[in-house]
Amino acid sequence: MIRSKAELTDLLEFGETISLECKRADSKLPNSIWPTYSAFANTIGGVIILGIEEVIEADNLFPRYEIRGVKNVDKQIKEFWNTINSETVNANILSDDNVYALELEQGSIIIIEVPQADYRYKPVFIKGNPYKGTFKRNYEGDYHCTEDEVKEMLRDSNDSGNDGFLIEGYTMDDIDDESLKLYRTEFELKNPDHVWNSNDNKTFLSNLGCYTRDRVTNKEGLTLAGLLMFGKGLPIRERFDNIRMDYIDKTNLLPGMRWSDRVTYDGRWENNLYSFFKIVIRKLTSDIKRPFILDGLTRVDDSPIHKAVREAVTNLIIHSDYLINGILKVEKYDNCLRLSNPGNLKLPVEVIYRGGNSKARNPRMQNILRMIGYGDNIGSGFPTILDAWKKENWRMPDLGEDVSLHQVELNLWMVSLIPEECTVFMNNTFGHDYNNLSSNQQIILCTAFIEKQVSNSRLQPLLEINSIDVAKDLKALVDNHFLIRNNNGRWTTYEINNLYQSELSQDQDGIKSGLSWDQVGTKSGLRWDQAKKVLQLCMTERTLLEIMGEMQLTSRNKFRKNFVIPLLNLHLLERTVPDKPNSRNQKYRITSRGKEMLSQG
């Protein structure tokens, strides 16, 4: 709850634009409030403020956010509740505490705090039609969900899962006998007295939820779980050409090597999930140190790390959405294991870190693996992974999602929080300035160094502080040139500014006097002919797209990262709206130091 002008100012200055919307509402409730309510509920939640108008052209916080106030506060709040409880909206997910007024000098405003909807209530839509009235949020604002996005939310709202439906035309002939034989052997070892051990294969698979019969049509055959877990590779690829499995080992690479080992569709293994699961588990755990522990006279040849890795791969299988395009990818690095799968998280990341559990998308697959000792029945088991990593004093695992790509990624970092090489780099790069930073800011820089980039959402569980406080530290590090910001709304990332070197220390005019372009180019990676063209174009103020058009370039992200950001950090180029990098009116112009560099060469 926002209780004061100071807290409101923090939200407006440091809040993420993807979860903040200001609307003018002089005397009546604006109709645009309902698409935003739907979008916030279906994405990550957010705050709607009525009575504040955003003035895009303004440079400073105030008057960029002009507080106009609202009339008839009680009447508008009552109208809001009447509408949200009517047929206009399919679900009211708010409590009384989520909607309130705040008195300011300029007038009263109304604040509506919209939480992320529980996956069981999604999609939240308006005007009675989920396919026309469902919205989501990205860094550009509210947008209509596609039919596929709506179907994905509808599937996820059903706790019975995605993997139990009949796949017509696929029968026991499509089962790989060897895979099923290996699984049944493992099943019997784990459950020697189980009554299913005497079943024939068809009955055994039926009991596992892998084979079914439609009682209405009398059609029978494999379920999604049955085909994907135990099917032959060719039938799987015929039916699920949208899904691929890939394991890549990038450890101990020599110059010129892309990987040291890879498991992909090459005809040397049966491309089903059970085979992939067993291969990946073996390869990931083969070189993990095994403790010498005795249980009586029997050696316990296992460790919490082995269990955590198995839990992570189990989660990869049971939480993937196999009905959308994507790759189940497992990558092994010298200091990290990276697992990614198609789909979105059903719970907010912060809830998962606190131990929250959601139903698996594929409960039959979950049961198949549980019956041979992998995973459990109560959810993701993410706390198992966190506890194992904490005992090793390793960096906290990084769980996140890319909503636009419909992809979840888990990074299991196998390095300490601040390893020695990180401290050496910080001292060499930032000198005494690094020692003057707060402990949280030092951790942010070390995280950016080890993980190549950081985001606000990644840092919240790591630092155990809220997004506003994280944003304050990130802004300070950007303003003081320790970090470079790659703007993309909630998915904005930050990376180390490698140009922050003693020989590039700034004076009042920009870069240290007497520095040659050869030195600058070495630090920035820019060739002089490339930089010179950009600087010449910016003798006249130009937008990003205008510069790209003149240089016949098409990728905005690559142009910003490879050209604009290095020149900004070198103080050869500057923004016309420095306090608002994402301003619609943003242009770029050459600095006096840039002109000096041009005159040299």
Image (cartoon, helix red, strand yellow):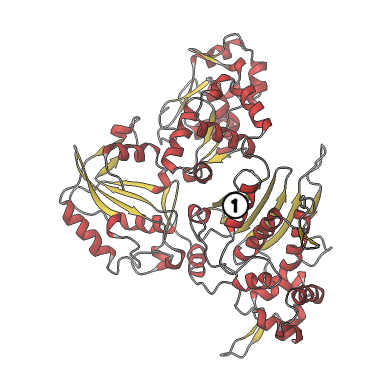
Instruction: Residue at 48%, 55% (x, y): give it.
Output: 351
Q: Residue at x 60, y 78 (%)?
A: 165
User: Residue 228, position in %: x, y?
Assistant: 69, 71
Q: Is residue 480 visible?
A: yes
Identify the residue shown where x is 39% and y is 55%. 40
Residue 135 locus on image (x, y percent):
41, 58
Picture mark count: 1
- Residue sitting at the far front: 296
| Nearer to the camera, 13 or 192 | 192
Q: Residue at x 80, y 41 (%)?
A: 253
Most extreme residue toward the top is: 514
Q: Is mark 1 on a helix, strand or loop?
A: helix
Asked if one can make out residue 560 in the rendered structure from this viewpoint, the answer is no
Name the quadrant containing residue 318.
bottom right
Give x and y (percent) for residue 94.
32, 60
- Residue 6 as seen in the image, left or right of residue 164: left
User: How many neighbours does mark 1 have within 10 angstroms: few (below 14), some (14-19), or many (20 or more)?
Assistant: some
Taking 283 as reference, is 131 above or below it?
below
Q: In which quarter of the image is the C terminus?
A: top right
Callout 1 amino acid: Leu
Identify whether 440 is placed above or below 120: above
| Residue at mark 1 | 386
